[in-house]
Image (cartoon, grey):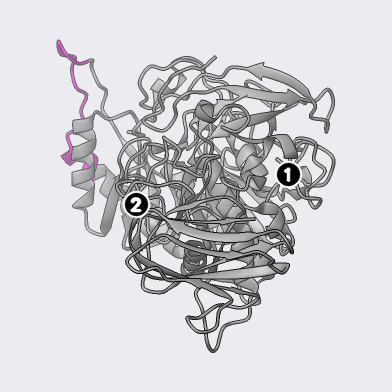
């Protein structure tokens, strides 16, 4: 029951399994339904974004005259007769649709779709106008999901009935993010996260308590499925379904019908699903609040609406809209281009403004199994880019990669890991077009699913630190506390520094600053879980392990190349002279330290030397 389709390179197979409710808020009856894939994104040939040297009304007025001369010089002011290879085309005009939130930027619309040659001529002529600094096509972007699917848990685990069986991404020792240990420190209370996506279904059965009203930024009724092109308050997801070939009017290739995805609700659920309410599943930062900013609908979403959505979410003024009464400290963007594309200038201007306002943007690296720096959003600077891993801790086959990826988080490996371990589950609406009163537990895969894990982690950090971190400080903290991959990641497809580890992240974030005898952050070891492909950096590597009393405890290194030495101590960071055990075999990566009668508490392991491709494991 797997349907192979394409959305640029962004969307592959889709399979959904879930549990419906007879009446909200129950989520307990199993159902299965299929969904088709979204159509390929169009180029948005009728809309452009233009940056002028003047801002607001002055820039808009000057641009109006420039458009008329540019249309004329580009040869668009006269009708074109039909030829044997092309249909007749009427004369075209252009107008300023609106000013944008990013200073100096405006949205321009032509009266008809332009051919590629016409578009190039129009951009060239308009770019040459006095006062015009930049002209770009207003492209359509897409959500970044890939596939849809239909352990022992600590006493502190939430009572949400599907948590233990479905949410491996929170609690699995190998592939999860160690959520329960993180919840001992923070649940994100007091922090607002904006989800720039398809919106959230209003009065969602297992999320509504944590949702603050946002805004629907979509300015084209074909995309929004509303009655007018006007933007409206709320940010509610009214569906993003498409009939067969619906999106061809926006420049897409012919495509099949597609049911509504409820993508934004799924993403928001990972961040802040209601938890310990005896319903459905859990959310990571479940005491945070989410603000839906709807920018994606049927056929995707225009970059101009997305850029305005970023700015509005962070509290900036956007022309014609009220200020956001709940500015977000964190913004999640699980969307991007389906084909190679550099960061649009209008995006980068918006990102820079958001960072200056103190908000942190977390983005999906993309699902093209390609270098993330060659796609939007990975090609943008000033954001935290997240790759996707499987339950095994290895790279998800679809995940984009590269030096631009900062760290990875669970996105699901799909059917290769089975159901449920191949998917990320959250509660979504059961409607195939518009929302209904029924809900399902839907399993998705994609970097769309990985990104909100990190956005939630950022919220959890900001909730407990004395002074909020900026994006650069947060990026450094996330990278330095990520758990090393338990399986080898090829050097040709780097996925950041490791997998998000909430326990290490939050412990490090809340520790007093070190002033003397400082050691690098400790990577947490799980019992019998190998950390593979270790290589030394500029500093010694430090690891920690929570031991029980009495049972034999062993630390071992092996494999790889080089020469490593191991020093171990209970309750303190070991040195070459202050240690409880050590192993320093000459010219070897094979070292073992064993304690036959360990004490209960934290043991620290320091590795020194030169080594690569090595494995470390703790066993008790």
Relative to 18, residue 296 above or below: below
Q: Residue at x 55, y 73 (%)?
A: 581
Q: Nearer the viewer, residue 75 or 266?
A: 266
Quarter occupied by the C terminus: bottom right
Q: Nearer the viewer, residue 409 or 74?
A: 409
Quarter occupied by the N terminus: top right
Q: Position of residue 504 (x, y in %)?
A: 60, 63
Q: Quadrant of residue 539?
A: bottom left
For this orientation, the residue located farthest to the top is 84
Q: Bin the neighbour count of mark 2 within 10 Å (Cα to Cα): few under 14, some 14-19, many 20 and up.
A: many
Q: Position of residue 64 (x, y in %)?
A: 33, 48
Q: Residue at x 14, y 10 (%)?
A: 84
Residue occupied by mark 2: 379
* Element carrying mark 2: loop
- Mostly what secondary structure, the magenta segment? loop
Q: Nearer the viewer, residue 121 or 111?
A: 121
Front disc: 1 or 2: 1
Residue occupied by mark 1: 282
Please report the bounds of the magenta region as a residue range.
69-86
């Amino acid at each position: 029951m797997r349907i192979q389709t394409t959305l640029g390179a962004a969307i592959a197979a889709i399979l959904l399994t879930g549990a419906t409710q007879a009446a909200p808020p129950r989520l307990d009856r199993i159902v299965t339904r299929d969904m088709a894939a979204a159509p390929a994104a169009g180029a948005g040939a009728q809309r452009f974004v233009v940056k002028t040297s003047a801002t607001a009304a002055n820039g808009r007025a000057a641009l109006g005259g420039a458009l008329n001369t540019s249309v004329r010089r580009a040869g668009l002011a006269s009708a074109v007769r039909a030829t044997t290879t092309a249909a007749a085309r009427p004369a075209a005009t252009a107008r300023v649709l609106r000013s944008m939130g990013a200073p100096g930027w405006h949205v321009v619309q032509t009266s008809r779709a332009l051919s590629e040659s016409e578009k190039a001529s129009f951009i060239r002529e308009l770019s040459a106008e006095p006062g015009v600094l930049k002209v770009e096509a207003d492209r359509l972007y897409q959500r970044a999901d890939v596939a849809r699917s239909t352990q022992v848990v600590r006493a502190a685990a939430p009572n949400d009935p599907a948590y233990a069986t479905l949410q491996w991404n929170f609690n699995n020792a190998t592939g999860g993010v160690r959520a329960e240990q993180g919840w001992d420190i923070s649940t994100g209370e007091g922090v607002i996260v904006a989800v720039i996506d398809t919106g959230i279904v209003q009065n969602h059965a297992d999320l509504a308590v944590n949702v603050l009203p946002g805004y629907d930024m979509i300015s084209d009724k074909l995309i929004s499925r509303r009655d007018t092109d006007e933007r409206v308050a709320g940010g509610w997801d009214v569906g993003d379904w498409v009939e067969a070939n619906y999106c061809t009017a926006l420049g897409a290739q012919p495509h099949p019908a597609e049911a509504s995805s409820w993508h934004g609700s799924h993403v928001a659920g990972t961040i802040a699903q209601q938890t310990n309410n005896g319903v459905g599943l859990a959310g990571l930062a479940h005491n945070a609040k989410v603000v839906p900013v709807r920018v994606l609908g049927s056929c995707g979403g225009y970059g101009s609406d997305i850029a305005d959505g970023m700015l509005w979410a962070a509290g900036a003024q956007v022309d014609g809209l009220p200020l956001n009464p709940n500015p977000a400290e964190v913004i999640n963007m699980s969307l991007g281009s389906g084909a190679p594309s550099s960061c649009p200038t209008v995006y980068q201007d918006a990102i820079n403004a958001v960072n200056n306002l103190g908000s942190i943007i977390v983005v999906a690296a993309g699902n093209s199994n390609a270098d993330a720096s060659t796609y939007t959003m990975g090609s943008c600077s000033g954001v935290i880019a997240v790759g996707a891993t499987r339950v095994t801790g290895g790279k998800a086959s679809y995940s984009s990669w590269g030096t631009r990826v900062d760290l990875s988080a669970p996105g699901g490996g799909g059917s290769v890991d089975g159901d449920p371990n191949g998917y990320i589950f959250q509660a979504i609406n059961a409607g195939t077009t518009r929302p209904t009163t029924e809900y399902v537990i839907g399993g998705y895969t994609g970097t769309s699913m990985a990104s909100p894990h990190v956005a939630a982690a950022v919220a959890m950090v900001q909730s407990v630190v004395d002074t909020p971190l900026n994006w650069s400080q947060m990026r450094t903290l996330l990278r330095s506390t990520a758990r090393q991959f338990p399986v080898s990641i090829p050097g040709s497809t780097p996925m950041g520094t490791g997998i998000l580890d909430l326990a290490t992240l939050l412990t490090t974030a809340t520790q007093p600053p070190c002033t003397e005898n400082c050691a690098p952050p400790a990577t947490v070891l799980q019992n019998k879980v190998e950390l593979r492909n270790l290589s030394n950096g500029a500093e010694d590597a430090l690891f920690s392990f929570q031991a029980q009393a009495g049972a034999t405890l062993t630390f071992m290194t092996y494999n790889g190349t080089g020469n490593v030495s191991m020093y171990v101590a209970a309750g303190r960071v070991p040195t070459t002279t202050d240690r409880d055990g050590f192993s320093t075999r000459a010219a070897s990566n094979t070292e073992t330290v064993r304690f036959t009668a360990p004490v209960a508490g934290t043991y620290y392991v320091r590795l020194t030397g030169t080594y690569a491709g090595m494995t470390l494991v703790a066993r008790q």
